[in-house]
Image (cartoon, rainbow, N blue to C red):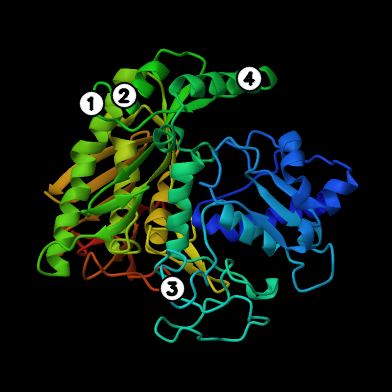
Amino acid sequence: MSESVVNEQVNVLNTAYLPWGISFILSSLDYTEDSDWFNNDQANESQYKSQLAINPSTTLNIYTTTADGYLGYAYFPDDFPESSYMHGVVLNYESLPGVYNWEYDEGDTAVHEVGHYLGLYHTFEDGCSGSGDQVADTPAQDDGNNIYNCWTMDTCSSTGNDPIHNYMNYVPDVCMYEFTEGQKDRMLGMINDYRAELGSELSNRTFFVKGYTIDKYIKSAKKCSDKIKQRFPDIKTAVVAAPLVSQKNHRHTIWNKKLATMSFYDAIIIHSYATVIKGKKEFGQMLTEIPEGNSKEEAFEIYKGRALSYFNEDYTKEVLTYNKLFNKPIWVTEWNLQISWTTGNTMLQSLFVANYFLELLWNSDLNSINLTTYHNMGGRDYSGSIFRINKDVLEMQSTYYSLRFIGQIFNVKNLNIKKKLISENVFEYLIFSNEEVIYSCFLNWDSIDVIIDFEATKKINLDAYFSENLFDKANIFGELSAEKRVNQSTNSIKIKPNSVTLISYLNE
């Protein structure tokens, strides 16, 4: 098996799982020659896995054999203890990409078996009755052994067409190309419960894992940081701080206190999401959103108030608390409005994103944040992505325009920023280069026009992005409503309701 084939298999896994927040890297590749192990897999499974497995708690081990004539197999997370060498995925070597010319030659068997490893059942589990695959958005299916092509089928008429394109079905590789939102939720839940150390939010995910302590994390993190700095002395490293809780003996509190006593790292990592919608949360995902108000207008007024409270109170308080405890720079490697079908791809989302960056530039209490990464760039319409790919078509989301506007500000040299309160929910941010005003950015969170007295001595460009309602969703081009104006001079400017408006001062 060549290394290029293995790398291509990793690429296939990432193509399938990356849209759902799960990724894979090839950490090592080893070859063991043993014809008995290779040809009589299941009779020797325990023996070869016990000798070859690499830390199953933190590493996905994949073995290639003849798989006793099967395409592959894997165990569910709860079949064995997390550290058991029995965990991992066994693949028929002929299922890897391009190894053998047949209908299972694109590498999707690995996608399917890793799905089992992460807790997914077959889509046809229990047939047309019973609890099925325990995922609500995969229609029931009578039998997976009667599918040999990509034809549309409906073997359980009460639930919709069979999910014949799902990775957890029995179909040729050419037919497979999708998971569902429900399958993603189940996989992430299983990662939380059983594969915690495979995730990146160590302080959060490992809260659910017995035996994984802050002491173990410090030992591993220090070892890793020291080795990196030996090779690259100028590089900076960061450790994962736990979410803040008030209980004295809570695991997260203990995690942060012990981590704060260490000095081997340069910064702390946090994730920060503004929660505006009440509901049932599980593993960071808003699963059930509780209706509020008597209409969309009333509901989004409530959400608006909570979003603004995040900037006015919650976020600043959170950052200052971390500052007091750690006295280290903060890297916010994920931030966003909470994941939500309700607010995703709306004008509310756009305003939030623009407001976040402008507050970060203006609010001195946030100066300890020197790295921030928006989550997420692409893939999902419900979480405020910048774009998503829908059937190979790139679709922009509502956040695109806000980020395009704000992106221009970051090009200003010797940037300085001042904030003006126009009204309770309308703000102006003045962007200076040295003492010269380069931009004015207005955020109007209200649903009414605002007239700004304005006398320009220079020619200006005005770009506005707005909507009639905060709940309006963008079209496939990321557009709600937009306008562009050029003025030589003016006495007043109308700021549209529910809008992000950027005024550029030109030297022409």
Residue 159 in view in this figure: yes
The residues tagged by marks 4 and 1 sit, at their Cα atoms, a distance apart of 35 Å
From the image, state whether disc 4 or disc 3 is nearer to you: 4
From the image, state whether disc 3 or disc 2 is nearer to you: 2
Provide the residue designation for mark 4.
229
Provide the residue designation for mark 2.
253
From the image, state whether disc 1 or disc 3 is nearer to you: 1
Mark 1 residue type: Gln
Please tell me how crowded label 3 is: few (under 14), some (14-19), or many (20+) other residues with Cα within 10 Å: some
Please tell me how crowded label 4 is: few (under 14), some (14-19), or many (20+) other residues with Cα within 10 Å: some
Residue 311 position within the rendered picture, expressed as x and y whole percent measured from the top left: 23, 41
Check disc 4 and report its element: helix, strand or loop.
helix
Asked if the residue at tag 2 contacts the one at tag 3, i.e. Cβ–Cβ closer than 8 Å, the answer is: no
> Which badge, 2 or 1, is on the more N-terminal residue?
1
Q: Residue at x 22, y 49 (%)?
A: 307
The residues tagged by marks 4 and 3 sit, at their Cα atoms, a distance apart of 45 Å
Residue 169 position within the rendered picture, expressed as x and y whole percent measured from the top left: 59, 70
| Mark carried by residue 476 | 3
Q: Residue at x 25, y 33 (%)?
A: 316
Please tell me how crowded label 2 is: few (under 14), some (14-19), or many (20+) other residues with Cα within 10 Å: some
Q: Residue at x 55, y 51 (%)?
A: 76
Residue 383 placement: quadrant: bottom left
Mark 3 residue type: Ile
Mark 2 residue type: Thr
From the image, state whether disc 4 or disc 2 is nearer to you: 2
The residues tagged by marks 3 and 2 sit, at their Cα atoms, a distance apart of 44 Å
Asked if the residue at tag 1 contacts the one at tag 2, i.e. Cβ–Cβ closer than 8 Å, the answer is: yes
